[in-house]
Image (cartoon, rainbow, N blue to C red):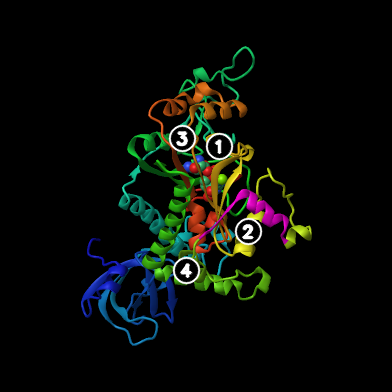
Amino acid sequence: MSKRLEIASILKQPPLNETITVMGWVRAFRNNRFIALNDGSSFHNLQVVIDPEQLDEQILKQIHFHSCIKATGQLVESKGAGQAFEVIASEVEILGDSSPEEGYVLQPKAQTPEFLRENAHFRMRTNTFSSVFRIRHGIAFAIHKYYNDRGYYYMHTPIITGSDAEGAGEMFHVSVFEPNKAPTLPDGSIDWKQDFFAKATNLTVSGQLQAEMGALAMGKVYTFGPTFRAENSNTSRHLAEFWMIEPEVAFFDIHDDMDLAEDFCKYLIRYILDTYPDDVAFLDKRIEDLEKNMPKEQRRPMGLLETLRFVVDNDFERITYTEAVDILLNSKPYKKGQFEFPIEWGKDLQAEHERFLVEREFQKPVIVRNYPKDIKAFYMRLNDDGKTVAAMDVLFPGIGEVIGGSQREERHGHLVKRMQEMNIPEHELWWYLDLRRFGGAPHAGFGLGFERMVQFITGMSNIRDVIAFPRTPGSAEF
Ligand code: 4AD
Ligand code: MG
């Protein structure tokens, strides 16, 4: 098998007139003669030309949409339009047929995202999904490159933990107890002491608290791993299992944190524009085609490529939460009663409010900072006004919140007070408090929702279509 050449390398350095072997999946088969072959190494297909008169009839019959084949032949310059080279096959072998008569469900026509989600084991063979997953890989790689080039250390924080970092209580429990057979205490509550870890544990919602330990020793660290939220949100932006990148930096304040967030987002987008131009161009065209027949109000204000360039080239808008509330209270949709949720200082901004700020008021990414302390997590640093905390959210067009972060409360007394107010048991986070008692320092960080960034860069409208195996309420197939 090792003799095969990958399509990406053939296109880069074509071994003209040599006999080569390629392997891949049939993306199209025209006129019983022209195969568009794709092996995943590139966005581009390689044309394999067969002679139906020469080829064994049995083999010819098995060249179906998405059949896997091996072809050997001479690489020549193509006379046809659409490709520079083609392989004139002298030998074709079927590695794996995919006959519709046997029940292969994908067809060479436009298929809905819902249908492809039900067939997620095959969907990466389509143009759209292979582009999405190549770009997903590219972003993951760029994330490591960004931090490595800047002297950050990659830190692996635990998947199983005893703490609820966000204090939101939306956790998946981890236990070896059989349902309904958990030992109980005299008061009827479960006796977690008898469980595997001798305490109640859950899947992590965030690696932040552990990353803070790293920052307060190694200076600059980041995590990149799966996180889990049992929130019952059936939206196009929520997953129960998603990946998060969490940089955490000693001697950073909220402004340094926002600078890092903006630079990081722009870097990732620029990296994909530079490294995967063909995939981005294809996805750009895909959206253009999808929106062609939509009424104007439902179309995006800009194409995908234009949006990405725009975000890279312009400064993000930075406003405080208080300013955001003022803008919203003076907005047309508010005055016309078009917002579903109330706007009032102290209440959290809803998706509709965030979208107004980003898509209509500023028409670019917006960073909102200094939120009321009562709607944010316990670890955020209290501002001098005593009412707000040094938190920041980065809001993107079409996606909403891509990043949530903050300067952390490094003052032991303030942190203890906040935990007491929010009923967070101090003994459970003894180590977190210790970090404030011994060798503490101002520090800050944030979490980037990986899939939301992939969604933004690929222009996919549903988050379930940018992760290979989406986990959402009621769904954990594959
Ligand atoms: O705003 P969040 O909850 O922040 C934290 O977890 C902090 N501990 C991060 C930190 O400061 N180190 O989540 C961070 C980001 C959100 O901005 C969003 O992009 C994404 O994670 N996110 C989700 N993505 C997909 N599905 C979900 N259910 C998500 N919940 C949050
Ligand atoms: Mg958040």
Q: Is residue 145 above or below residue 183?
A: below
Observer-side mark, 4 or 1, equals 1
Residue 209 is labelled as 3
Q: Are marks 4 and 1 in contact (CB under 8 Å)?
A: no
**Where does label 1 land, which residue?**
382
Q: Rounded to the nearest whole Å, what is the CA distance between mark 4 and mark 1?
A: 36 Å
Q: How dense is the environment of label 3, judged by Cα within 10 Å: few (below 14), some, or many (20 and up)?
A: some
Q: Name the secondary structure under disc 2.
A: helix
Q: Is residue 260 magenta?
A: no
Q: Rounded to the nearest whole Å, what is the CA distance between mark 3 and mark 1?
A: 17 Å
Observer-side mark, 3 or 2, equals 2
Quarter of the image where the N terminus is located: bottom left
Q: Are marks 2 and 1 in contact (CB under 8 Å)?
A: no
Q: Rounded to the nearest whole Å, what is the CA distance between mark 3 and mark 4?
A: 35 Å
Q: Nearer the viewer, residue 466 or 411?
A: 411
Q: Rounded to the nearest whole Å, what is the CA distance between mark 2 and mark 1?
A: 25 Å
Coordinates of residue 404 in the picture (x, y in percent): 53, 47
Label located before the other in sequence (4 or 1):
4
**Where does label 2 land, which residue?**
357
Looking at the rendered structure, the kind of residue marked 3 is Leu
Outermost residue on the right side: it is 336
Residue at left offset 60%, top offset 24%: 180
Label located before the other in sequence (3 or 4):
3
- Give the extent of the magenta segment: 316-331
Residue 309 is labelled as 4
